[in-house]
Amino acid sequence: MLASLLTGCPPGETPLRHVEQVPARPLASAAWPDWAAPELVAALAATGIAAPWPHQVEAAEHAWAGESVVIATGTASGKSLAYQLPMLSAVLADTRSRALYLSPTKALAADQHRVLTGLGLPGLRAATLDGDTPFEERDWIRQHANVVLSNPDLLHRTLLPQHQRYSSFLRRLRFVVIDECHHYRGLFGSHVSLVLRRLRRLCAVYGAAPVFVLASATSATPGQSAARLVGLPVRTVDSDRSPRGSRTFALWEPPLLLGGSQDAEQSGPIRRAAGSEAARLLADLVIAGARTLVFVRSRRSAELTSLAAKRHLVEAGAPELAERVAAYRGGYLAAERRALERSLTSGELLGVATTNALELGVDITGLDAVVLAGYPGTLASLWQQAGRAGRRGQDALVVFVARDDPLDTYLVNNPAAIFARPVEASVTDPANPHVLGPQLCCAAAELALTTADVELFGGPAAEPVLAALVEQGLLRRRPAGWFWTDRNRPSANLRGAGHPVTVVESASGSLLGTVDAGTAPATVHPAAVYLHQGSSFVVEELDLEHGAALVRPEEPPWTTCAQEITDIVILATEQSAMLDGVSVGFGAVEVSHQVVSFQRRRFSGELLDETPLDMPLQRLVTKAVWYTLDEASVAEAGLDQKDLPGALHAAEHAAIGLLPLFASCDRWDIGGVSTAQHPDTGRPTVFVYDGHPGGAGFAARGHAVLPDWLAATRAAIAGCECPAGCPSCIQSPKCGNGNNPLDKAGALLVLDAVLSRVISR
Ligand SMILES: [Zn+2]
Ligand SMILES: [Zn+2]
């Protein structure tokens, strides 16, 4: 298959950067545990599972023995059996036992419900409980359901605040399953970790101590991440023993094109879009008879990729094949996904271009080829998507096509970062006071907090937060503990601090989503192009006072980018090191920024115009990592004073682009500031900060892995063959300064100066 792609390349193009052969893994099986319920074993056998794989049994045994456990293995490695075995055996052995299954999406919980009820087990009463469950049904669920499928939001908003009504459920709770637990990261993950501690506290009050079974994509330190998430020691099972066909994994970098517009000088070189490249690969693979899935980043590009592939097929004289290519553009309706699974499995469809909507909860494996148009954000997702390829006994092909982005550039030119490295850690920070504060209020409103509870909620980290809540009059300290005294329930938003701005479609009044109040001026200012699940909207009006942005569907041929003035002040240096003229620091900072205008740019990057905006000054107290250089090290590096601002700015952009390789964030979770003379350090300084109040652990992770992170940043810049900087290396789509000034050669000198100090240690 790879050979046919290479012969399909236009003359003169050499996009193939690396080929990795991932060997097949042979079949290994284990015996059913002797405690497994016989009717469950029989039901599983009826679905075609004759014997479990060793890693499934290993995880299930831990759970059955009362040890919380995380199973962190690849796609299609049967993680669900590892938690179904103990959870279902427990409720079948004693139908009064209860289990709670939590998933990050409603769709996944619905899928799991379908699987469980499909087993046809008498005695199993499984029910989904989410925001849409009617109240009459909730009564039945509270009293009778023995496996409840839900999500952390429902736990936070309904089940825990109404714990008295759910007391018999909590009293009998034996297992809590947390599926796809790598989704709980950053600020949201920190909130969820405290919601789980609230659950554990109330269970203990009712006399239960449930065992947690977590399922995760492969990750760098799954046991550590899981233990931080649930606040308990957690066993790790990560040796994947599921059988797998061999795979050929190709890294592909589309060629650099010169401008493409009359304005080539200004817009500079850009790469052929990953979507266009993927469309051609899709057409070639379909001609070769390969069942192929293409993952793209938005619904719009799913449609464009599918259309372009059809066009290639018609041009290649195969119009009948064009009809067997489709875009997956439905919402998340189970019926649509089932239909797609069926037509791909039957071979009726040969090629599908899809968003990552198909990444979770869809049973499509056994494809001949998977094409990833752009890095999906995390290595965990990359392996999840790549895992769709591979029929037993046959070699499958995976092609990763780089987008115009420093992280993609780095990956295709540094294969070891994909193939020889554990994936990024899921970072949470349950000690963040901005998360702890509202969560402690919620906990106290559920049941007064005792001194013994403080340990559960972070111990020393919680004490100053409790004192501050008492001072603000939110909690009252009495001899028996801390009490919530307000008649109203405390509010805590699991997905961000403050009151979010709701995004509403003006014609229909339907709610599209929410954005952080802090980022609203930059993302939903008037005339901003707002993308939602791959569809494009234009903002008509932003009302910050009432927290609403009105939008209309529209797909203009340009993007918008807010321009801001940003200042950063160091509030407290928590860690610092001075290394021969270069210093590295970490601590609390206050970032103030004000959106002053926005630019409209064509997709080629060409600037159309700039319009002033009148937006309020925003302040953010958060965590940052920074480095500085003194005058001597700047001179020694061969850097000219006048080139310094562009050099630091370029190094900052690329570093922001590469941090997601080490912490499971995306570049929108973090921000940066660079300056040739910072008032607090008195030196040229580059800051990278967490974009969430109080920090979410990303800057801390950057500080912890600084040498590796900056080395990767340097490699990404050096690996890009553009002459003076492009979106694949040092330009940023979210730059508040219109990507000006930027100095590619200077950035390499800055990074070399820092790396020569931090690496030699
Ligand atoms: Zn470049
Ligand atoms: Zn910038």
Image (cartoon, helix red, strand yellow):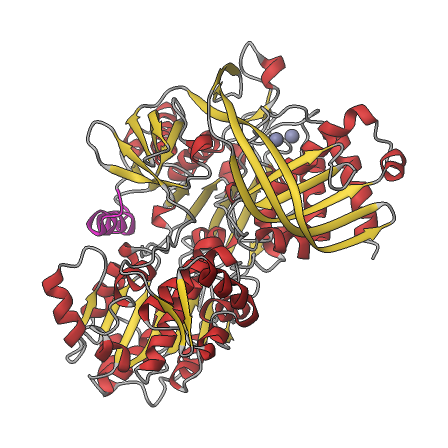
Q: Is residue 412 above or below residue 431?
A: above
Q: Is residue 181 above or below residue 399?
A: below
Residue at image position (32%, 89%) is: 35
Q: Is residue 576 found left or right of 319 in the rendered image?
A: right
- Helix, strand or loop: magenta stretch: helix
Number of disc labels? 0
Q: Position of residue 381 (x, y in %)?
A: 46, 52
Q: Is residue 78 visible?
A: no
Q: List the single residue furthest toward the left.
A: 136
Q: Nearer the viewer, residue 750 or 565?
A: 565
Q: Position of residue 22 (x, y in %)?
A: 55, 57
Q: Position of residue 432 (x, y in %)?
A: 52, 58
Q: Nearer the viewer, residue 461 or 338?
A: 461
Quarter of the image where one finds residue 674: top right
Name the quarter showing ligand 1: top right
Q: Is residue 86 found left or right of 383 in the rendered image?
A: left
Quarter of the image where one finds residue 87: bottom left
Q: Nearer the viewer, residue 570 or 95?
A: 570
Residue at image position (61%, 22%) is: 269
In the image, is residue 336 part of the stretch drawn in magenta? yes
Q: List the single residue furthest toward the top.
A: 262
Q: Is residue 72 visible?
A: yes
State which region is magenta.
331-347
Q: Is residue 103 above or below residue 213?
A: above
In the image, is residue 712 part of the stretch drawn in magenta? no
Quarter in which the C terminus is drawn: bottom right
Q: Is residue 295 found left or right of 659 in the rendered image?
A: left
